[in-house]
Image (cartoon, rainbow, N blue to C red):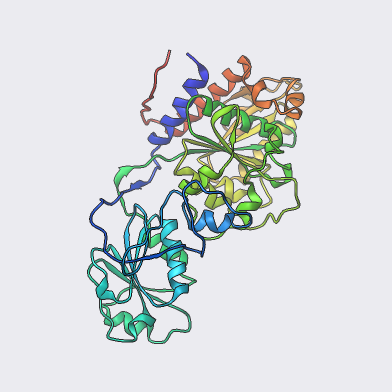
Amino acid sequence: MNTATSTGRRARAAHTALPWHPEHSSTPGTEARPGVGDELATGNGRDVQAGGPVEENCTADLLWAHDPSWTHRGFRGGEVVDGDGLRVGLVTHDSAVREMVSGICASAGASLYVAATAGGLTGTDVQLLDVQALTDGPATRGGGGDVVLLGRPEDDGLWDAAALLGGCPVAVLPAAESWLADRLAPRTETAQTSQAVVVGVVGAVGGVGASTLACWLAADAAAGGAQTVLVDADPDSCGVDVLLGLESLEAMRWPDLSRSRGVLRGEQLLPLLPGHPDQPGLSWLSWDRESVQRHDFPGVSVLAALRTVSHAVVVDLGRIGSGRDSLAGQCDVVVVALPRTVRGVLAAHRSATALGPVPVEFVLCGVDVADIDHSLVGDALGREPLGAVRFDGRVPEAAESGRLLERGRKRPHQQCVAALWDQLTDRLAGSVELTYGGNGS
C-alpha cells in the first residue's frame, strides 16, 4: 500500500469520525427572493468580484467582510447582497448602518435586502430594523422572520421601541457586530460537518526538529489526498516558508491577517493561502522576517476557520509559552518532539504539564546517545511515545536548500510519518470506526 495515500485517507476519515465534531449548518432553499433593491451593495465601500485581485492594503477588509465568490446584485427598489445563507431584511436610512450590515451579511454568507419601511420586507428569515428608521411612524414588524432592533450608543428610545416590537433583541452597533454575525450565521441541524483534525507540534527543547516534523506530517497528509494546511504559529522562527523554500514567494502571511477584523470564514481564507507548487493539496500560512506585532494576532480565529474547510491542519507551535498556549488549546492533540536524552525527557514532561488538559503525545527524535528507549520514556512521561523519527544528517542541508519535503519523501521518513498518522488517528478516534475512501492496495 502506498503509505502517503493511506495517510491521506486516514486524515480525511478522522476528520469525519471524531466524536467532538459539531453539527453542520443547513443551506436554505432557493425560494423566491424579496423584490427589493437597484443599488449595488459594496459592503465596506468596495466592489468585490469573483476572481478579482486583492488590492494592496485592502486584504483585511476583503477577507473578513466579503467573499469574492459572491455576487452583489441590484434589484428594483433597494439594495441586495446575495448569499446562500439566511435571508435578511434591513430597514434603514443610514448609509453607515447599511454598509456595516452588508459586511456582516457577507461574512455570515447571508442574503441582504434593504427597504425603506418594514412593510417592504416579505419572505425574510430575519428582520433588522434601524430604530432611527422607525421614528417616522409606529414601530411595526415587517412581513415575516425574527426581528432584531438596531441602534447606536447615542440613540434614545431603543428599549421602548423593542418593547413595542414584542420584546425583540437589541443590537447596539458597532459593539454588537460579532453577536449579530453569529445571529445571522446559518442554523445548525443534526448532520455532522467536515471538520479538520488539528495537530500541534512543539519541541521539548530548541533544535529538536519540531518544525521538520510538522512539515512532514502536513506534506504526508496532503500526498494522500487530504486537504491540508500547515500553520506557522512560531513568530520567532522567521517563517516556516524558509524550510519549504518559498520565502521569496509573494503571498499572504500572518502580518496581513493581523490587520484583519470582523468574522473570518474558512471559505474566504483558504483560497487566499498559498499552496506548495510541488505538493498538491498542501496550503501554508507563515510568519515573515520583518519585525511584527506578535500580540493579538488572530490565531484562534484562523484555526477555527480552517477547521471548517480542511481535512487536516498541522500547527508548528515552536516552543510552549509566549502566548502560544492558547493556540495549543485549539488543537485536538499536541505532539511533543523530544531528543533521546535525559534532559529531553525532563523538558518534555515540563511541556506536557504546561499544556494542561490538551491531549499530548510524544515522538522521539535525533541520535540515541543516552540509551533512551520507548519504555523508559513511557515510565517517565506516563505513556510510551507514538514513534521515533530516524536521525538523518542530510536534513539540515535539505532545509537550507528548500528541499525539506523532498527529503521527507525518502522511504524511511515516509514510513515513519505515515505510522505516526496511523497512531494519531487511532488515539484520537478511539473506538470510533473509521471508513476509508478511495482505492488502496
Residue 37 spot, x, y in % from top left: 34, 66
**322 lies left or right of 27:** right
Q: Can residue 384 be seen in this view?
A: no
Residue 24 spot, x, y in % from top left: 35, 46
| Placement of 180 over or under 374, stated as above or below | below
Residue 87 spot, x, y in % from top left: 31, 60
| Placement of 295 over or under 289, stated as above or below | below
Which residue is drawn at the image coordinates 73% and 43% (left, top)? 238
Q: Quadrant of the C terminus?
A: top left
Which residue is drawn at the image coordinates 37% and 42% (left, top)? 193
Question: Foreground: 20 or 132?
Answer: 132
Question: Foreground: 212 or 323?
Answer: 212
Q: Can residue 224 be seen in this view?
A: yes
Quadrant hosting residue 72: bottom left
Quadrant hosting residue 92: bottom left
Which residue is drawn at the image coordinates 28% and 75% (left, top)? 118
| Placement of 78 over or under 215, stated as above or below | below
Quadrant hosting residue 351: top right
Residue 61 spot, x, y in % from top left: 55, 59
How many numbered tags mark residues here? 0
